[in-house]
Image: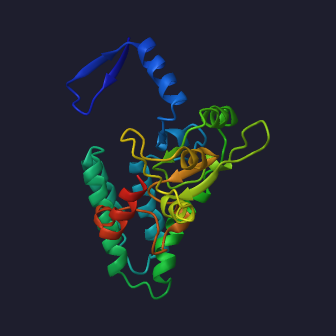
Amino acid sequence: LRYVFTADTNHVQTVDRNKLESDLISKFKNNEVIAILGSGAAMMLSSQAMTWTQFLIQYAVETQQLLSTSLNSDWCNKINDLVDRSNGDANTLSEIAGIMANVLNESDLSTVGTLEAHRIPSQRLFERCRIDKPGASEFVKALRSMRCPIFTTNYDTLLEQVDDGINSNRLEAYSHTTFMSIEEEYNNWPGLLSDSNRIVSEESFKRLSDGKVIHIHGIYTDSGDENGFTLTAEEYANDRTTSEFLRFL
């Protein structure tokens, strides 16, 4: 039996492993599986990969260094203190990201530029990440062998930097808005069908599964762009972002 912990930490459900595997195999055959990867996948590829908490702390450090003339020297310490007291709560961390964004928006960015102030910190953080974990190519090979859509909440492009070990093919990075703009060229997108159990056509599903990684929160290279990566609770609540995101899902 495999233990499955639900959102309620006091509740533990037992699942028959054989039945779980049988159900998964059946759903794979019926094209009913989507792989959704988080920071754990990035950490299997690079020792420099960061958790969400680590990202916020390091983002603050890079921002402080970039805007040393505009930000108080104790700004990073305040951010660290807030992160420590969050106990990893996602909503609290998102609020902290909002605080950081507001500080940027209220700072004197004349020496750097607004676009650069948002882009450079994330660029410095993610471009120092290198593929250095053994088994990286095997991991990506196994991922591709599932032949299902790959979604990630990660901003980095580590998955796309790994050769599959067979044809030296690499996965391609797409933000969800970029993929939507491509798919809208096809008459069958979003491919709504009369069958209520399947909302995407077979053709669209295959294109979605063909070596693409869809970054549902954006990619770090998008920072500073009007369609840049989603970082704060306020950005999640933005009407345009929400409508595009829900349409994609």
Quadrant of the image occupied by residue 101: bottom left
Instruction: Please identify the quadrant where the N terminus is shown.
Output: top left
Which residue occupies the foreground of this view, 145 or 124?
145
Instruction: Pick out the residue farthest to the bottom.
Output: 110
Residue 36 position within the rendered picture, expressed as x and y whole percent measured from the top left: 47, 41
Residue 39 position within the rendered picture, expressed as x and y whole percent measured from the top left: 48, 44
Quadrant of the image occupied by residue 131: top right
> In this rendering, would 118 be left or right of 163?
left
Residue 136 position within the rendered picture, expressed as x and y whole percent measured from the top left: 66, 36
| Residue 7 drawn above or below residue 211 | above
Residue at (56, 61) in percent of width and height? 186
Instruction: Pick out the residue farthest to the front.
Output: 194
Residue at (45, 12) in percent of width and height? 18
Q: How many labels does the image show?
A: 0
> In this rendering, would 64 be left or right of 182?
left
Residue 183 position within the rendered picture, expressed as x and y whole percent measured from the top left: 55, 60
| Residue 162 drawn above or below residue 72 | above
Quadrant of the image occupied by residue 100: bottom left
Residue at (44, 61) in percent of width and height? 59
Which residue occupies the foreground of this view, 172 or 92?
172
**Is residue 108 visible from the viewing direction of this image?**
yes
Which residue occupies the foreground of this view, 28 or 4?
28
**Is residue 74 visible from the viewing direction of this image?**
no
Residue at (43, 51) in percent of width and height? 192
